[in-house]
Image: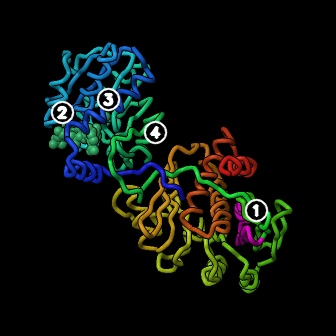
């Protein structure tokens, strides 16, 4: 999987910053660099629009004073309103370099552009209600709004809202993304996210999910070489059918639905095998050409479903476990290298109420189970047992409809059959699912995603 923009927690940002200072980088120089990067973005988008900067007591406020000075230097009508007294060496220096007046936040008049530099990664609690109300009022009154590093009031590492937060047009992340830029609810409060490079060295163990690069079949490819997928059917036919059809459109060469009902449905390209008994299922799975097996969609939760799941768990193929399989299984039973696709409820049932952010929880679950975890939601977190994490955010909220999870599970199994790499396959599937939804527009049903998937794949070749 191509590594995207790194995501760092507040503590990791501080460590990265300290490493730079230890290497001789000047403390205030870094603030000037951050402020210059942000001022450039605001200037390019807004030109000479009158601008109000809100500056807090820490280094986020210091960035704000730098931005104010640089915008004014370009002839922008700038006013500054401060909260509290600048408390860090760098922010005091930035304030001293600002040669204009400083208004009181409580009484400052609105402007066409609003820049929030009240708090960033140092926020330790919710804003005072009167301050939060002022921030919302002034941001609501502006036609363009920018949050510097983070919207003031969101918790950096979890994406929780600690106080009332207005909706911002743009958030300018400094140095790296933070979890709150991608995790909900905070992610809902920023329309556009820009990351300014200020030379922060960062590991790419945790990063934003990037658009995948997919390979088109070559002249020597045949259906087995491209990947044979088995989708295990169960009590409810529709779910495994949707999954099988998604797998068939994932780029894999062939899909078999191992049906519990013996019925042939759906696309003719999908081979339906009668696997109604556990023995018959075992025979179908006894095929060395299988490159992945999906179990869970429509499986059911009774003793028959459990027996079918047991047969799959012992089959030795690469597995994708979804839906009912996640309800039936215990952590100790999860085979190493499998892919699990839990939504919130399934995740908590399986792994318990783990501490930390969604990223922390997904990573802990992957390490504990030895599986790749796709922790689904409006923000999907993909975690591998070795600590790599990719975060996908901003998918269509119309995906919250029946059957879209089955489509994702089929896509995951299909991409796993194609690549053989669980972490890469999970990322590719989440990306393609999100893009298929975007192409499907509004009020779609899960079946509609099947039609938009080929275009989503074509866009990544
Ligand atoms: N790291 C980097 O690489 C770089 C970082 N840079 C910038 O620095 C920012 C981080 O700066 P920072 O650490 O000074 O924290 P910041 O968010 O300004 O606030 C801390 C101050 O607010 C206070 N406080 C907290 N919550 C409060 C509340 N609810 N209500 C009232 N007060 C509250 C808190 O005091 P406390 O009471 O918690 O002791 C403290 O005084 C970062 O987001 C980025 O913009 C760039 O310049 C360069 C590269
Ligand atoms: K801010």
Q: Which residue is mark 2?
A: 91
Which numbered circle lies on residue 38? none
**Quadrant in the picture for the N terminus:** bottom right
Q: Which residue is mark 3?
A: 116
Locate residue 151 relative to residue 348 in the image: left or right. Answer: left
Check the image and report above or below for 4 versus 87: below
Front residue of 208/284: it is 208
Whether the residue under disc 2 has CB within 8 Å of ligand 1: yes
- Tell which tag, 1 or 4, sits nearer the viewer: 1
Residue 229 counted in the magenta span: yes
Q: Secondary structure at mark 2?
A: helix
Q: Secondary structure at mark 3?
A: strand
Of label 2 and label 4, which has the lower sequence position? 2
Of label 1 and label 3, which has the lower sequence position? 3
Q: Is residue 147 visible?
A: yes
Of label 3 and label 4, which has the lower sequence position? 3
Of label 1 and label 4, which has the lower sequence position? 4
Residue 238 x/y as whole percent: 74, 61
State the CA–CA distance, disc 3 to disc 2.
Answer: 15 Å
Q: Which residues are magenta?
A: 224-248
Which of the 4 quarters of the picture holds residue 412?
A: bottom right
User: Taking the image as four quarters, which one is ligand 2 found in?
Assistant: top left
Identify the residue at horizontal 48%, vertical 33% (top origin). 191
State the CA–CA distance, disc 1 to disc 3.
Answer: 52 Å
Of label 2 and label 1, which has the lower sequence position? 2
State the CA–CA distance, disc 2 to disc 4.
Answer: 29 Å
Whether the residue under disc 3 has CB within 8 Å of ligand 2: yes
Of label 3 and label 2, which has the lower sequence position? 2
Check the image and report above or below for 345 versus 273: above
Which numbered circle lies on residue 218? 1
Q: Which residue is mark 4?
A: 188
């Amino acid at each position: 999987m191509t590594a995207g923009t790194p995501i760092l927690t507040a503590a990791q940002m501080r460590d990265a910053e300290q490493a730079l200072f230890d290497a001789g980088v000047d403390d205030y120089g870094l603030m000037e660099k951050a402020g210059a990067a942000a001022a450039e973005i605001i200037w390019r988008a807004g030109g000479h629009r009158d601008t109000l900067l809100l500056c807090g007591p820490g280094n986020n406020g210091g960035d704000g004073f730098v931005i104010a000075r640089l915008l004014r230097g370009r002839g922008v009508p700038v006013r500054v309103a401060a909260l509290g007294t600048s408390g860090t060496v760098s922010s005091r220096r930035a304030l001293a370099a600002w040669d204009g007046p400083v208004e009181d936040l409580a009484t400052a008049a609105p402007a066409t552009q609003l820049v929030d530099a009240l708090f960033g990664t140092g926020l330790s609690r919710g804003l005072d209600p009167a301050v939060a109300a002022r921030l919302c009022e002034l941001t609501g009154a502006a036609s363009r709004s920018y949050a510097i590093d983070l919207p003031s009031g969101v918790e950096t590492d979890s994406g929780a809202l600690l106080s009332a937060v207005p909706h911002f047009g743009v958030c300018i992340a400094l140095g790296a993304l933070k979890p709150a830029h991608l995790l909900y609810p905070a992610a809902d409060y920023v329309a556009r996210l820009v990351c300014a490079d200020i030379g922060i060295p960062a590991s790419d163990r945790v990063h934003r999910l990037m658009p995948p690069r997919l390979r088109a079949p070559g002249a020597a490819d045949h259906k087995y070489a491209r990947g044979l997928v088995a989708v295990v059917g169960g009590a409810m036919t529709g779910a495994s059918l949707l999954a099988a059809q998604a797998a068939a459109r994932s780029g894999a060469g062939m899909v078999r639905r191992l049906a519990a009902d013996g019925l042939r449905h759906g696309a003719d390209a999908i081979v339906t095998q009668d696997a109604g008994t556990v023995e018959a299922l075992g025979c179908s799975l006894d095929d060395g050409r299988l490159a992945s097996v999906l179990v869970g969609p429509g499986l059911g939760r009774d003793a028959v479903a459990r027996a079918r799941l047991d047969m799959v768990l012992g089959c030795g193929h690469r597995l994708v476990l979804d839906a009912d399989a996640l309800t039936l299984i215990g952590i100790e039973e999860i085979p190493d290298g499998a892919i699990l696709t839990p939504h919130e409820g399934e995740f908590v049932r399986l792994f318990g109420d783990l501490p930390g952010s969604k990223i922390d929880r997904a990573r802990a679950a992957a390490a504990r189970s030895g599986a790749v975890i796709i922790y689904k939601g409006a923000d999907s977190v993909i975690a591998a047992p070795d600590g790599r994490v990719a975060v996908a955010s901003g998918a269509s909220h119309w995906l919250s409809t029946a059957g879209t999870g089955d489509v994702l599970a089929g896509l995951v199994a299909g991409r796993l059959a194609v690549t053989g790499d669980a972490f890469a396959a999970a990322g590719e599937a989440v990306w393609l699912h999100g893009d298929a939804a975007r192409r499907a527009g509004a009020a779609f049903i899960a079946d509609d995603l099947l039609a938009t998937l080929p275009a989503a794949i074509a866009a990544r070749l």
